[in-house]
Amino acid sequence: MAKKAKGSHSTTSASASSASGKLVLRIKSNEGIKRSVRQTNSRKKPKAKLKKNKRKFDAMKPKKPPTAFFYFLEDFRKEFQEKNPDVKSMRDIGKACGEKWKTMSYEEKVQYYDVATDKRAEFDRAMAEYNKKIESGEFDETDEESEFDE
């Protein structure tokens, strides 16, 4: 029993010391807390000064094609605006389009998937050609960098 008392006594004293440490922090005025927060924040670099690695814009790189939904959206937008000329909000048109897309069967969506896969295949061929040109050094990257840095 004496061992238990010693063990419990040491844990209580440890918790008391940690509790007293917490109490000390709570007793401090708001000024001290604000100052310590300011000091810790001042050690960090300001967000404005941090530079993000911006990717270089390559005008020669092929653009990714839209998905099947976006091809559907083009057609649906035309139909929807003819039926509802009073609705001008893209938000409302987008909501109606999304609801229609969800309720469509796969057979109805196939035509849009076919267009999207054709465009994707064209894009893949163009990217393969672009990558070959990059590897062979046909595009001079230093000239492009200097154009965009100015």
Image (cartoon, helix red, strand yellow):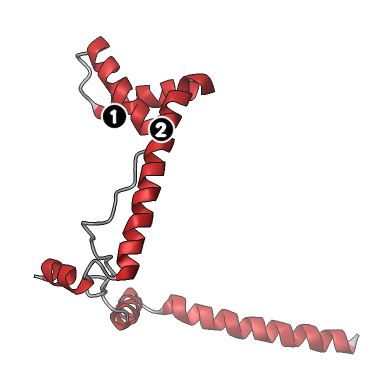
The quarter of the picture where the C terminus appears is bottom left
C-alpha separation, residue under disc 1 versus residue under disc 2: 19 Å
Question: Relative to residue 115, is residue 5 depicted above or below?
Answer: below
Q: Position of residue 33 (x, y in %)?
A: 36, 77
Q: How crowded is mark 1: few (under 14 residues within 10 Å), some or many (20 or more)?
A: few
Splitting the image into 4 quarters, where does residue 47 fall? bottom left
Of all residues, the one furthest to the right in this rendering is: 1
Q: In which quarter of the image is residue 9?
A: bottom right
Q: In which quarter of the image is the N terminus?
A: bottom right
Secondary element under disc 1, as helix, strand or loop, is helix
Q: In this view, does 111 lie above or below 10?
A: above
Q: In this view, does 73 lie to the left or right of 16?
A: left
Q: In this view, does 120 lie above or below 19?
A: above
Query: Residue at left 28%, top 22%?
Result: 77
- Identified at 22% across, 71% down, the residue is 141
Q: Can you give x and y, in whole percent of width and height, for residue 48 in the image? A: 22, 70
Q: Can residue 67 be seen in this view?
A: no
Q: Is the residue marked by circle 2 packed among few (<14), some (14-19), or many (20+) residues within 10 Å?
A: some
> Looking at the rendered structure, which numbered label has been put on residue 91?
1
Q: Which residue is drawn at 40% across and 49% down?
A: 124
Q: How many labels does the image show?
A: 2
Considering depth in this image, is 123 or 35 the residue closer to the camera? 123
Q: Mark 2 points at which residue?
A: 68
Task: Please tell me which of labels 1 and 2 falls first in the chain.
Answer: 2
- The answer to whether the residue labelled 1 contacts the one labelled 2, judged by CB atoms less than 8 Å apart, is no
The residue type indicated by label 2 comes to Ala
Whether residue 4 is visible: yes
Q: Indicate which disc residue 50 carries.
A: none
Q: In which quarter of the image is residue 42?
A: bottom left
Q: What residue type is labelled 1?
A: Arg
